[in-house]
Amino acid sequence: MRAYARELAELASPRSIRVMKRQLWEAQFQTLAEATAAAGEEMRQSFGAEDFKEGVAHFVEKRAPRFTGR
């Protein structure tokens, strides 16, 4: 695994990694408009995810994140 991919895997939530991988796969079968709409919906859904709340909390509290993948 390249250094930047390893660093991303250590810093990003498992949920985010999962979503990004799926979006990259699906994008090859979508128009730009479809991919943009899907990304917007994923972003909307992420605001209610546990990992989003943990991401904000770890940043504010200046501590390592404890992501759950949810």
Image (spheres, rainbow, N blue to C red):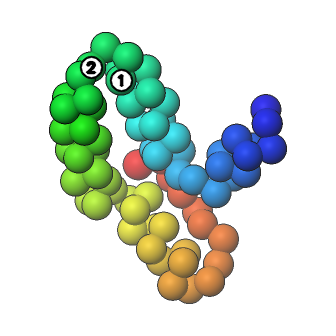
Q: Is residue 6 above or below residue 31?
A: below
**Quadrant of residue 22 within the rendered picture:** top left
Judge the density around disc 2: few (<14), some (14-19), many (≥20) Cα neighbours within 10 Å: few
State whether residue 39 appears in this view: yes
Judge the density around disc 1: few (<14), some (14-19), many (≥20) Cα neighbours within 10 Å: some
Q: Is residue 49 above or below residue 59?
A: above
Q: CA distance from mark 2 to mark 1?
A: 5 Å
Please name the residue shown 26% across and 59% down the image: 48
For label 2, the residue is 30
Please name the residue shown 60% across and 66% down the image: 65
The residue positioned farthest toward the top in the image shown:
29
Please name the residue shown 66% across and 46% down the image: 9
Please name the residue shown 23% across and 47% down the image: 40
> Are the residues at dot 2 and dot 1 in contact (C-beta closer than 8 Å)?
yes
Q: Is residue 56 above or below residue 7?
A: below
Q: Is residue 33 rendered to the left or right of residue 14? A: left
Q: Can you give x and y, in whole percent of width and height, for residue 66 in the image?
A: 58, 63
For label 1, the residue is 27
Closer to us: 31 or 25 = 31
Closer to us: 54 or 29 = 29
State whether residue 45 appears in this view: no
Q: Is residue 41 rendered to the left or right of residue 49? A: left
Q: Can you give x and y, in whole percent of width and height, for residue 38 in the image?
A: 23, 36
Kindly identify the amino acid type of the residue bearing the numbered disc 1. Answer: Ala
- Tag 1, which secondary structure? helix
- Tag 2, which secondary structure? loop
- Residue 61 badge: none
Kindly identify the amino acid type of the residue bearing the numbered disc 2. Answer: Gln
